[in-house]
Amino acid sequence: MHTLDLGYDSVPLSMNSRMHWGKSSRITKQIRTTAWLLARQAKVPTNCDHVTVCLHYRPKVNRRRDSDNLMPVLKAACDGLVDAGLVADDTPDQMTKQMPVIHPAEKGRDGALWLTITIGDPQ
């Protein structure tokens, strides 16, 4: 399993975001580029038959959150992984995208956003 720390301490995009399309587009491109760069730096294998990707979020403080609001971040990150050559496309036959996981806040720690990538067919 490979873990890529996306470098965000909060969620940069949400399904509930009401930001201007231009700003949203810039953030999406930034997430995509970050995932591409991190995958290349981590030397994650390329041309895989199948990968499973999960987005993890640890907020700074505990409160109610919907994990499906993280889907725009997951989508942009998965596109970046395709750009890095992990798989040819992020279609279900080549990439399983798990529902994002929200972890409990940890006292004294900042928030964090990271990806886990498992190479091979899902179990």
Image (spheres, rainbow, N blue to C red):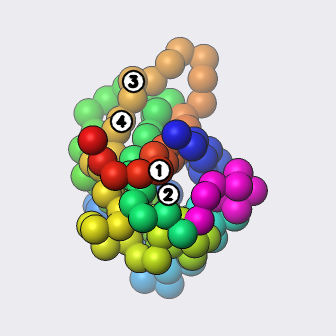
Q: Along the horizontal axis of the image, is 42 left or right of 69?
A: right
The residue sitting at 70% across, 62% down in the picture is 40
Q: Tell me the crowding category of disc 1: few under 14, some 14 to 19, or many 20 or more residues within 10 angstroms, Cα based.
A: some
| Placement of 73 over or under 107, stated as above or below | below
Residue 119, numbered label:
1
Q: CA distance from mark 2 to mark 4?
A: 15 Å
The numbered mark, 2 or 3, whose residue comes first in the sequence reads 2
- The label on residue 12 is 2
Any part of residue 113 in sight: no
| Residue 33 vs residue 53, the one in the foreground | 53
Residue 43 spot, x, y in % from top left: 70, 55
Residue furthest out toward the bottom: 22
> First in sequence: mark 1 or mark 2?
2
Q: Is residue 52 left or right of residue 69?
A: right
Residue 60 in the image: above or below residue 19: above
The residue beneath circle 3 is 104
Quadrant assignment, res 74: bottom left
Q: Mark 2 falls on what kind of element?
A: loop
Q: Amino acid at mark 2?
A: Pro
Q: Secondary structure at mark 3?
A: loop
Amino acid identity at mark 3: Pro
Q: Position of residue 73 (x, y in %)?
A: 43, 60
Cα–Cα span, label 3 and label 1: 27 Å
Residue underneath mark 4: 102
